[in-house]
Image: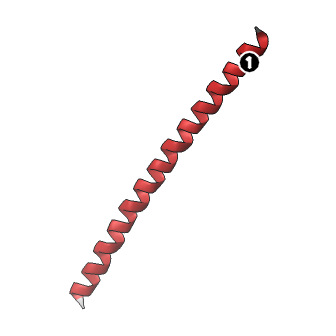
Amino acid sequence: MKLKFKDMFGKTQDNTIRLKRKIFWFFVIEVLLVIALLGFTFFLITVVLN
């Protein structure tokens, strides 16, 4: 019983690490998208003003 519990705990720990990695990558992609959008809007504004 203890061994099974340990295996389950190990699996859950692995899943949390994987989930954290997914959240981290999602955050990175979100930041990159925001930067890209800001850059694009700034570029459009400069083109319109000129």
Residue 35 drawn above or below residue 23: above
Task: Name the residue: 31% across, 80% down.
Answer: 8
Residue 12 drawn above or below residue 50: below
Q: Position of residue 37 (x, y in %)?
A: 64, 32
**Residue at the disc numbered 1:** 45
Task: Name the residue: 68% across, 21% down.
Answer: 42
Q: Position of residue 29 (x, y in %)?
A: 52, 43
Query: Which residue appears farthest toward the right when viewing the image?
Result: 48
Give 13 or 39, whichever is nearer the viewer.
39
Does dot 1 land on a helix, a strand or a loop? helix
Q: Count the marks: how many?
A: 1
Quarter that holds the C terminus: top right
Residue 15 drawn above or below residue 30: below
Q: Is residue 17 shown left or right of residue 45?
A: left
Three-letter amino acid code at disc 1? Ile
Disc 1 residue crowd, few under 14, some 14–19, many 20+, Cα 10 Å: few
Task: Name the residue: 38% across, 67% down.
Answer: 15
Task: Name the residue: 62% across, 25% down.
Answer: 39
